Amino acid sequence: MDTEIKKVLPIDGNLSFEECERILIPEDVCLGILDENREINSYVLKEDLNKALRFNILDRSINLIATITEVIDLDINNLNESKLKKYIKPGLNKGVFIGKSKREINNLVVCRNICQMEKEQFIVKEYEKNIPKEIKEALRLCAQAADKIALPLFLVGGVVRDIIMGKKIFDVDITVEENAIEFSKFLKKEYPHIFKIKETHEVFKTTKVIFTIDNENIELDIASTRKEKYPYPASLPKVSEIGCNIREDILRRDFTINSMALSLNQASFCKLIDPLSGYKDIKEGKIRILHPLSFINDPTRIIRALKFRERFTSQLEKATDQLQETCLESGLFDSLAGERIKAEIKQTFNLNKAECLRKFIEEKIYFLIDKDIQEPQNAKILSEKTQKIIKEYDNFISSKDLTWLIYLGVLIVDESKDNIKKIADKLYLSGLETEILLGSKGIKDRINILKSSQTQYEIYEILEGYFPESILISLIKKTDKEIEDKINLYINELQDIKIYTTGKDLIEAGITPGPMFGEILRELLQAKINKEISTQEDEKEYIKKFIPRI
């Protein structure tokens, strides 16, 4: 194992980046961050401090990039490598303190060469089992072309994760160690009758291509390996290099479980490229970021981590959990634009899992929307009720794609109308999505009128015209049994009541067409909802009383 030994300089965790910058830190020294008990729990390497100083966050606490680690009692002059390997992992967790206790720490041991820890591994069986045959054929053709020009070709990211986890594959991303657009042109030359380029993106040098195999279109995304830099916190990354080594491409990604590649070239077919131990984290159910600045670079990763935790029954690794909490509490993202946040919230809440909302509330992830949202009480009960109601009224919801909006509405319906509009603007919600949220607020504001309603038609009039999702948000939020019963009555019965009579029927009955038609049909509906009439014959009899009025 290639390691370095750093001396530990204890500092207060509340010191700002600017104050830490003034501390002269030699290359062989790291910062040991003291907690409220004056114990050293975490560290900051000089290289990470320098990266953070490029951002305009000089007034923020150094805790934003501090990595928690363990303390082990070893002889610094005779380090036990096998024991070190139990604590040191490549990427985020590359350091471990050496000392008697958290109050007696002098050194940090850091692993430098992450690739040195990588074991050679092939996952041919998993590949063969989980990739559909048509996709496998498209990938074989890509690899055959790549081998002709000695071009390294890889499956990368989520598809590799899903192969390992035994999930069926539908979306496939492949990466080449050069310009993907040029490789796509080569594929077009090699397979002119079954291949076409659907679209290209010059900035990132990526393409979307289609193979036609056995009369089926197989769509693949082909990317160039690349390095990226973030100009400021939460910004979109800027490409700094195209065609880098695959391991360097892996280091720009979000979590270790998504930071693997699988070789498609014949000579190394199905060799797993896993410098950050993503395979082990999958097996252990851990979600781990790659470096201390990961959430600062892209805070939407916090919501994405929640999605993966619930999809894969995983949990945040300890240092990742601490960095998430620190970032959320920092206020660094209070003015964050929300289009990407909306996309992550949508994917997460559309899972319709109660734990997503509970953790979103209890872990303060909603700070990414608005730090001043009134935190709902009894998050566990509210979350479980939300999941239950959505499942129960699945057919009532306009579209399954709006499930997420019910969760969001449950979270913010107690806000003022102006604040709901502000949140909607921040998240770039559509007009329809905004109206659904405002509708739930409208029902909430009329809840006392609903409670005092005496007839079924009065209930109908109050709730008529609201979107189903707005009504469900109100149903979830109310704990008043009488209100719940009335909303349930509307959903399960009243909303579906229709009259048989039409304008044509009124004319045939001898009633002269005019504005009165609407009033008659409305009164007829009222009578039917209030169960004064029920059959088509009842309606014919009922409208007779209007004939003398005309």
Image (spheres, rainbow, N blue to C red):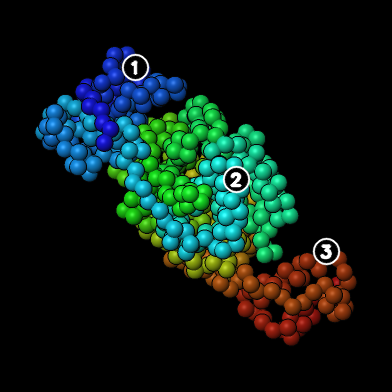
Amino acid under label 1? Glu
Residue at the disc numbered 2? 148
Q: Quadrant of residue 338?
A: top right
Q: Is residue 373 left or right of residue 281?
A: right
Amino acid under label 3? Pro
- Whichever of labels 3 and 2 marks the residue nearer the N terminus, that label is 2
Which of the two residues, 157 or 359, is positioned nearer the viewer here?
Answer: 157
Q: How many marks?
A: 3
Residue at the disc numbered 1? 21
Q: Within 10 Å of the Cα at label 3, are there few (<14), some (14-19), or many (20+) other Cα atoms?
A: few
Q: Is residue 541 above or below residue 312?
A: below
Q: Is residue 323 left or right of residue 510?
A: left
Nearest-to-viewer mark from 3 and 2: 2
Q: CA distance from mark 1 to mark 3?
A: 78 Å
Q: How far across and down, in percent of the image, does residue 170 sit?
A: 55, 58
Mark 3 and 2 residues: CB-CB less than 8 Å, in contact? Answer: no
Residue drawn 70% across the image and 64% down it: 215
Q: CA distance from mark 3 to mark 2?
A: 78 Å
Q: Is residue 119 visible?
A: yes
Residue at the disc numbered 3? 515
Q: Quadrant of residue 290?
A: top left
Q: How far across and down, in percent of the image, does residue 196 sit?
A: 71, 50
- Whichever of labels 2 and 1 marks the residue nearer the N terminus, that label is 1
